[in-house]
Image (spheres, rainbow, N blue to C red):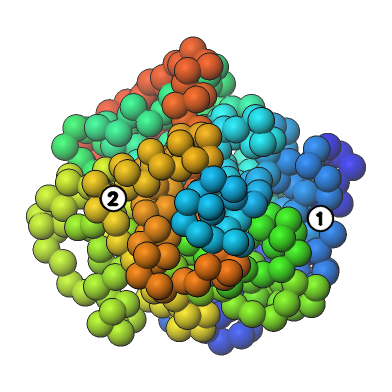
């Protein structure tokens, strides 16, 4: 596919100042601007031409900042719910599913929507790039990047906390171009991020960039493009569980583009984002009408993270305050931050499996639980057009149908290793 693909044309824009500039290959920040801001892609093509499903995620390539396509991808699938909709008395519930569900044409071997960002980010990376991409993650992002880079022979260094290594399961071995390093037991996601930042001080490496990377956001925005394409309209409500909030910001950005396209209506979906109680830093900030996340004691935060089942929702530094982040998105589009307890998410996950026919990730069960509560308390009406973003699922099914192998770390580092030690180890790896 790569050879025939014509690069997507786009400019980048600072949300803070509106300044537009070219993508110098891996631009993550607005040049010469002091204030922090997200940057956004402005596509040449205002009306999206959605290709057939054989293109995988690249069926949405018109609105992906890429210049090549990779093999093996699947696009999120949207379908009208029967079982759950009837149970809740909803007439217009659409489910967008990113995971493993071959019967519905969803073939994500890593079982979450993080695969969409990996295909988009790696499609942005130039084939001439000599540096090694670095990704820090404690969950689905690590697995998605490992699989995509392995299948497409893209050098990758993954930084993961040792206690989370069990997220690195696969149905086939990972190619040697992907190397894993870990921060020692007892460390968390932030220690892995710190390690990745140290690595990126060395010449050989480039940071993936997280929510600052337009390609990451556009990849996740394909969930909304899938829904709008299937429904023919922009939904009224968008339900998604959030950790970093990147997915919800991407959903809002995709919504703005769909309005500009002109064929899908001109409404903004209310962003009904959700967290796993008692970890609810976004709800606390949003309900206090605060652009800043409220101060939180680190030890208290760690305690709370231990309690919740949907660990991927425990990001303590979400993309919330920065211009163009979740606070701005929700101020513009409306919505609320909802929560579900462990008990509620377990119940919702079981209900989904029973009524729709597939298992879902605990995070997606949080979104489902909050939808159920929103129906019960009258926040949404029976005929509202609702998109439920099932951000991960089919993992139990996938594991039942496949033999599973694990990626092993090449080195386990102390929490704050010296640069010399790091260099010595990494020089042997790349
Ligand atoms: C399955 C799943 N759902 C939802 C989320 C939250 O996404 P975001 O961090 O973009 O808010 C994650 C994050 O890892 C995830 O893995």
Residue furthest to the top in view is 403
Query: On the picture, is 348 further left or further right than 131?
Result: left
- Does 7 sit above or below residue 54? below
The answer to which image quadrant residue 415 occupies is top left
* Residue bearing the label numbered 2: 344
The local secondary structure at tag 1 comes to loop
The answer to which image quadrant residue 230 occupies is bottom right
Task: Tell whether circle 1 marks a residue whose Cβ is less than 8 angstroms from ligand 1.
Answer: no
- Structural crowding at the residue carrying mark 1, measured as other residues with C-alpha within 10 Å and reported as few (<14), some (14–19) or many (≥20): some
Task: Look at 20% across and 41% down and name the residue there.
Answer: 187
Q: Position of residue 117 (x, y in %)?
A: 57, 49
Task: Look at 71% across and 68% down and name the residue there.
Answer: 233
Q: Position of residue 140 (x, y in %)?
A: 44, 40
Task: Look at 80% across and 38% down and name the residue there.
Answer: 54
Report if residue 19 is visible in the image. yes
- Does 337 sit above or below residue 8? below
* Residue bearing the label numbered 1: 50
Q: Quick one: quadrant of the N terminus? A: top right
Q: Position of residue 423 (x, y in %)?
A: 37, 36
Cα separation, mark 2 vs mark 1, equals: 37 Å
Residue furthest to the right in view is 4
Task: Look at 70% across and 72% down and name the residue there.
Answer: 257
Among numbered discs 2 and 1, the one appearing first in the sequence: 1
User: Comparing marks 2 and 1, which lies closer to the viewer?
Assistant: 2
Query: On the picture, is 427 further left or further right than 114?
Result: left
The answer to which image quadrant residue 265 occupies is bottom right
Task: Say which of 50 and 10 sits in front.
Answer: 50
Query: On the picture, is 237 further left or further right than 58?
Result: left
Task: Say which of 418 and 79 sits in front.
Answer: 79
Q: Position of residue 414 (x, y in %)?
A: 20, 36
The local secondary structure at tag 2 comes to helix
- Does 140 sit above or below residue 30? above
């Amino acid at each position: 596919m790569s050879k025939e693909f014509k690069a997507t044309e786009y400019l980048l824009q600072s949300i803070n100042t509106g300044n537009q500039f070219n993508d110098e290959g891996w631009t993550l920040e607005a040049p010469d601007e002091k204030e922090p801001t997200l940057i956004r892609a402005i596509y040449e093509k205002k009306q999206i031409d959605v290709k057939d499903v054989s293109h995988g995620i690249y069926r949405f390539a018109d609105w992906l900042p890429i210049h090549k396509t990779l093999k093996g991808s699947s696009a999120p699938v949207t379908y009208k719910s029967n079982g759950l909709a009837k149970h809740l008395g909803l007439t217009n519930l659409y489910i967008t599913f990113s995971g493993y569900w071959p019967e519905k044409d969803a073939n994500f071997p890593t079982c979450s929507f993080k695969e969409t960002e990996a295909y988009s980010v790696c499609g942005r990376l130039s084939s001439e790039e000599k540096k090694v991409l670095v990704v820090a993650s404690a969950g689905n992002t690590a697995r998605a990047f490992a699989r995509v880079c392995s299948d497409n022979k893209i050098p990758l260094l993954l930084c993961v906390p040792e206690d989370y290594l069990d997220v690195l399961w696969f149905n086939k071995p990972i190619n040697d171009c992907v190397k894993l390093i870990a921060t020692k037991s007892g460390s968390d996601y932030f220690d892995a991020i710190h390690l990745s930042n140290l690595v990126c001080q060395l010449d050989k490496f480039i940071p993936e960039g997280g929510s600052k990377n337009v390609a990451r956001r556009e990849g996740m925005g394909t969930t909304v493009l899938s829904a709008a394409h299937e429904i023919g309209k922009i939904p009224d409500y968008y339900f998604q569980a959030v950790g970093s909030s990147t997915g919800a910001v991407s959903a809002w950005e995709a919504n703005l583009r769909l309005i500009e396209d002109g064929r899908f209506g001109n409404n903004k979906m209310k962003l009904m984002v959700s967290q796993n109680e008692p970890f609810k830093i976004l709800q606390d900030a949003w309900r206090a009408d605060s652009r800043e996340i409220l101060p939180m004691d680190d030890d208290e935060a760690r305690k709370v993270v231990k309690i919740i089942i949907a660990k991927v929702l425990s990001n303590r530094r979400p993309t919330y305050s920065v211009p163009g982040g979740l606070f701005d998105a929700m101020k513009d589009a409306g919505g609320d931050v909802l929560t579900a307890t462990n008990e509620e998410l377990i119940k919702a996950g079981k209900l989904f499996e029973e009524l729709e026919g597939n298992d879902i990730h605990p995070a997606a069960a949080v979104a489902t639980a909050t939808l159920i509560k929103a129906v019960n308390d009258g926040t949404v009406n029976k005929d509202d057009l609702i998109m439920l973003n099932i951000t991960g699922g089919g993992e139990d099914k996938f594991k039942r149908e496949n033999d599973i192998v694990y990626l092993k770390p090449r080195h386990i580092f102390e929490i704050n290793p010296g640069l010399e030690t790091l260099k010595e180890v990494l020089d042997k790896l790349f």
